[in-house]
Image (tube, rainbow, N blue to C red):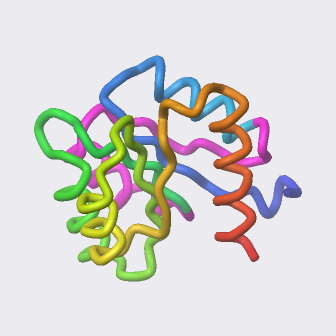
């Protein structure tokens, strides 16, 4: 990705180390991380302020969970690209998020290389 075409990404996760991990991987894939938030409410506010091309959104967070934040983001911009982050494998929740507008899911327990590969696949699909 050229600098002019860098995808702007917002990372929303209540664990600062997970935020940093995803930010570093995204930057290595040519993205620009324009913000990080620790809960859904702050994530929605940053989304409205920064208008990123992609939001990585954790499911389980304090203040506002990822499902509610997803719904608010989609209400603000029905074309938003939101990818959910999760440490659990719950097909029902995944289906609910896809129906609410999420583009994809990334499991946080894939390990560093697995997350890198998975994010690369997601970015390729979103920028195709």
List x then y, in percent, for residue 97. 30, 65
Residue positioned 56% across, 64% down in the render: 53
How many tags in the picture? 0
Residue positioned 36% across, 71% down in the render: 98
User: Is 128 situated above or below 72?
Assistant: below
List x then y, in percent, for residue 49. 38, 56
Specify start and end residues of the magenta stretch as a single range. 28-53
- Is 59 one of the magenta-colored residues? no
| Outermost residue toward the top in this view | 17
Residue positioned 24% across, 76% down in the render: 75
User: Is 45 situated above or below 35?
Assistant: below
Residue positioned 72% across, 31% down in the render: 113
- Is 42 one of the magenta-colored residues? yes
**Quadrant of the rendered image containing residue 6:** bottom right
Q: Is residue 2 left or right of residue 97?
A: right
Pick the front one: 111 or 24? 111
Q: Is residue 124 left or right of residue 40?
A: right
Q: Is residue 96 left or right of residue 94?
A: left
List x then y, in percent, for residue 87. 38, 35
List x then y, in percent, for residue 32. 67, 46
Pick the front one: 64 or 51? 64
User: Is 86 situated above or below 73?
Assistant: above
| Outermost residue toward the right in this view | 2
User: Is 88 situated above or below 113?
Assistant: below
Locate the N terminus and report the quarter of the image it occupies.
bottom right
| Outermost residue toward the left in this view | 63
């Amino acid at each position: 990705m050229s600098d002019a075409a860098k995808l702007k990404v917002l990372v929303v996760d209540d664990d600062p180390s997970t935020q940093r991990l995803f930010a570093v991987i995204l930057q290595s894939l040519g993205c620009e991380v324009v913000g990080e938030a620790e809960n859904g409410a702050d994530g929605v506010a940053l989304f409205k302020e920064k208008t990123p091309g992609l939001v990585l959104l954790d499911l389980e967070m304090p203040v506002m969970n990822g499902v509610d934040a997803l719904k608010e983001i989609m209400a603000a911009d029905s074309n938003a690209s939101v990818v959910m982050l999760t440490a659990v494998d719950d097909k029902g929740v995944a289906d609910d998020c896809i129906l609410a507008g999420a583009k994809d899911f990334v499991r946080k327990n894939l390990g560093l290389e697995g997350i890198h590969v998975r994010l690369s696949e997601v970015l390729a699909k979103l920028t195709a």
